[in-house]
Image: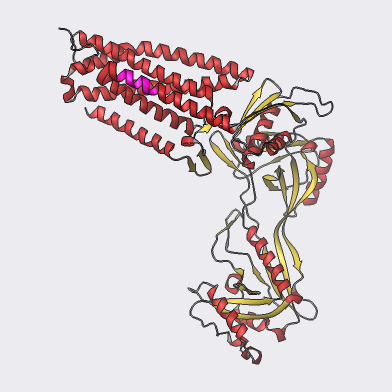
Amino acid sequence: MRRYIRSLLIIVVLIAVASAILLNKTITIRDLTIGSDSILGLNLGLDLQGGSDLRFQAVDPQTGEPFTPTKDEMNALIRSIEERINRSGLGRPAIQQLGENRLLVQLPGVEDLDRAKSLIGETAQLEYKKRTLNVPASLNISDQVLAIEVKTIGGTTSTEDTLEANETDSTEETSENSTSTETQISENIDDSQAIPALIIEFTETGSLQFDEMIERMRLSLSPVIGTEQEIDGEIVPGSGDIYPNYIEVTVLNTDSKATSTPVTLSYSPVAILPNGTKLSMGGEPYVKRIGSTNRFALNLNAAGVDVELASSLFTEDKYDSLNFVEIVGRVDDPVGLTGKDMSRAYPSTHQTTGLPIVNIEFNSEGAKTFGEVTTDMYSTGDLLVIELDDKELISSRVQSPITAGVGFIEGPDFTMTRVRDLSLLIESGRLPFPIELIQERDVDAILGADSLAKSLIAGLTGLALVLLFMLLYYRLPGLIASLALLIYATLLLALFKLIGVTLELSGVAATILSIGMAVDANILIFERMKEELNAGRTLLSSINIGFSRAWPAIRDGNVSTLITCGILFWFADTLGATMVQSFAATLALGVVVSLFTAITVSRTLLRIIAVSSLNKFSFLFLPTGKPSS
């Protein structure tokens, strides 16, 4: 009995997990999102949701005639199109190769079809860029400064208090306007801590320019957009580095030379990891506008500037002018190299270290340009960046000039999975052939909704009739089989959602068929049980023998079905018959789940009943009454 209860608990846990998956339309696990906005979060195909069916053909770039690319080129093209559509937010595409040079792209629920066709039809654009770090850019706003002072703000300090260094005759003349402004300073600063700050007041024009600079500083703390691919279950990230912008304020003397260390700040706290990677820590901004005024506060503690020194320097009668410099964290400039200049990219391992690397080879023209670029960048600290469709693949420093047109890229976090993926993406950016749209089929969303409604009615009606028959004819075992069928339906739909099955009309038909096959397995078992009960065996013995003797027939029948599904799937994949392919895949999954429910769920429930007080009522287990003596 204890063993049966353990099996029952496992079944209950599976039902609970499956129900949770179905009740939540979308489930997010780290960067992976499962589900959709449709019924139960299932991914519906074109015929159930509406959308577009597009077929493309590879053509020769010179003649415009159809031609046959290599298998690797087609795989790279598929990966590029899939990544591009996913990033565009147009939905989850279903992409399939038809024959040797054609692609089928299905876009369920797509609304902006013209944009989708444009995204798919363009070949990927690979480009090399030089990334220069910390580039100073002068801000011509010195003449827009109206006032500057050092104040301690926040904490318990009164809004009227200023540092002694600023208590000159000029600060004694306060107007109603300045008092109001000081109150706003206090309201916009964290009151939990007193902060010495450099307060700068600009003209209207100057405040707008300074505000725009602060916004650029804020945006610079966002990670660089990089690719994120899931390969063999592993998330392969692109660059997640940040390159923060800084503001630098310096006091100048009459010779236009700095008289002190500048006040240098990022927008908010930034952490630098041991490997040099920078991360935004969030928190209160170091530089910000004070309320709706034209005054700005710069945190002197964060800048590491001595308050008394700052108070003595940033006093209007003690300096000639101010110099404002925006230090731009990164500037990316094209170097004149694209995918057309490459011969190939492929994964490999370093001859000395054995670590994974990406080998890149250029054609004659590309080798010349690449040699010039790497010679100029060598020992400068600048980064060489490879982008695909304006999305960073990788950035690295040039270790030595590369003039032979053959080089490699290495990284501390490189794995064979990642270098294989990087190679594939780089290859997709050098595809020498375009693709043209040769066939287009649209399915109206209303028609899809009508098909979905009819499919639901058909499925539920069929399920209800099967349950009714099992209850009326097989009595208590029929009730067990009905419960197992409901569990089967729950597990199957949860599995569809979990592995991302796109459910089409043919898939619905296969699901309904698999319900019948699940019932067929139960009928075989129950008939064997009936024979054993009529032979005078106990209920538990009849259940065990019934399952044992029915299993070979159930196994052989389902294995034959799985073999048929495999053949159908292979031919459908070869010929591009997506409806047949969907039918075969869905039926195969249904058969596997039905085996579990028929053999595990039904048997566990029947065994529990057999050792309960219900085993005395043998007529409940026989459609023809009590067993003969």
Q: Nearer the viewer, residue 290 or 382?
A: 290
Describe the colour scheme in one phrase.
secondary structure
Is the stretch drawn in magenta largely helix, strand or loop? helix
Q: In which quarter of the image is the C terminus?
A: top left
Residue ID at (54%, 77%): 186
* Magenta run includes residue 416: no
Q: Quadrant of the N terminus?
A: top left
Q: Is residue 608 left or right of residue 103?
A: left
* Above or below for 219 versus 53: below
Q: In which quarter of the image is residue 609?
A: top left
Residue ID at (26%, 22%): 606
Q: Where is residue 469 in the image (x, y as percent from the top left)?
A: 33, 18
Q: Nearer the viewer, residue 274 or 55?
A: 55
Residues in magenta, as a range: 463-470
- The outermost residue toward the bottom is 169
Q: Position of residue 35 (x, y in %)?
A: 50, 37
* Above or below for 155 versus 461: below
* Above or below for 27 versus 328: above
Q: In this view, does 21 lie to the left or right of 540?
A: right
Q: Is residue 55 at least partly visible in the picture?
A: yes
* Above or below for 65 versus 81: above
Q: Where is residue 487 in the image (x, y as percent from the top left)?
A: 36, 28
Q: Is residue 420 left or right of residue 551?
A: right
Residue ID at (54%, 26%): 504
Q: Is residue 355 at least partly visible in the picture?
A: no
Q: Nearer the viewer, residue 537 or 3?
A: 537
Q: In this view, does 401 lie to the left or right of 287?
A: right
